[in-house]
Amino acid sequence: MASFSPKLGIDLGTTNVLVFVPGRGVVLNEPSVVAVSTETNKVVAIGVEAKKMVGRTPDSIVAYRPMKDGVIADYRVTEAMLRYFMRKALGKYNLFKPTVLISVPAGVTSTEKRAVIEAAAKAGAKEAYVVKEPILAAIGAGIPIHEAMGYMVVDIGGGTIDVAVISLGGIVASTSVKCAGNRLDRAIIDHVKKQYNLAIGDKTAEDIKIQIGSAVPVGEELVMGIKGRDLVSGLPRTVELKTNQVVQALNRELREMMQAIRKVLQETPPELASDIIDNGIILTGGTSQLRNLPELVLRRTGVQSKLADDAYFCVARGTGIALKHLDTYKKSIISKH
């Protein structure tokens, strides 16, 4: 019967969940948001539907993210979310329980790992494996992780930046810092509030970051009209924001991220450090797509860095490849239910 068990790879992120099915690719990419009714304590909506409700809900409905900084903050809701995504990815006619492989941040404790495995099992997985994110990101970015060669992967998502040096299929030095995409959005909100007395929401902040943001100041700035609520008059108002103002707003958060990269470089054995100079630093994850981030990494570390192809999907792709070759990867990365 085992051969009928479908396989699913899940990139369980703070802001988004991606589900990968070997042979089909990424079949699902939805926000990790769940809307819960405060009156009945029931889950009202999950994913895209729930994200639409953020900042727009009546008092009786709360929309929130059950994953905080890459780990499970609300167990019951995460389980409901996993079950929903697994069913949606497999289709309702599937009778067999899937074998599931889930990503976790590099710095996760064994208790947190167990929580993910248990949530997956309760959500209907036949077998659940967890794999550290940087390893998956590396596999997904096409890095030959089993070679006796040092590679540095920097995976920047919504909740955490995971930095790891990988050699011979294992992590040699790593750190995981709770400073990533969400913190950048918050920094933009604070900046607009301070500079313009204007209140904007998370969604607007994210749009600003994506459309005109940059990691280093630029000569030709992009401009964007920002709509929000004036904090003095309480009325809607529009202001213009330019790229270099956003760079300034993100400064502190980006410095913290660069600090994480430098810290891992400082802990790297010399032989591997020389490999990293040759191979460069590989950037993966959604937030690594911030304009000019490789340039900032180069300025702060002196090491060339490059954005992986399809950086956003690296971890999800990595889960798919690891599932295909479970036996090869078993020893280096997987702990099992």
Image: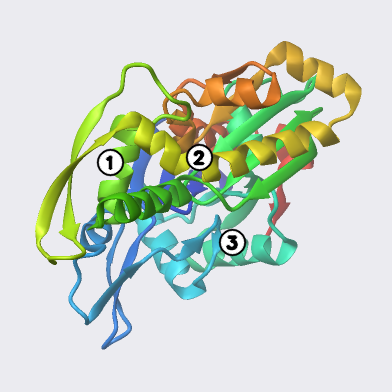
Give the number of the mark in front: 1 or 3. 1
- Where's residue 5, x and y in %? 51, 48
- Label whose residue precedes the other's in the sequence (1 or 3): 3
- Label whose residue precedes the other's in the sequence (2 or 1): 1
Of residues 222 and 53, which is closer to you in this image?
A: 222
Q: Which residue lies furthest to the right in this view?
A: 270
Examine the rendered structure and indicate whether residue 76 appears above or below residue 297. Answer: below
Please state if 259 lies on the left or on the right of 156 as rendered: right
Q: Which amino acid does label 2 sit on?
A: Asn
Q: What residue type is labelled 3?
A: Val
Give the number of the mark in front: 2 or 3. 2
CA distance separating discs 2 and 1: 18 Å
Q: Residue at x 46, y 67 (%)?
A: 79
Q: Residue furthest bottom?
A: 39
- Where's residue 83, x and y in %? 41, 62
Identify the secondary structure beneath mark 3.
Answer: helix
Please state if 106 lies on the left or on the right of 36 as rendered: right
* Residue behind mark 3: 116
- Where's residue 332, x and y in %? 77, 39
Q: What residue type is labelled 1?
A: Asp
Q: Quadrant of the C terminus?
A: bottom right
Identify the secondary structure beneath mark 1.
Answer: helix
Dot 1 alpha-carbon crowd within 10 angstroms: few under 14, some 14 to 19, many 20 or more: some
* Residue behind mark 2: 251
* Residue behind mark 1: 207
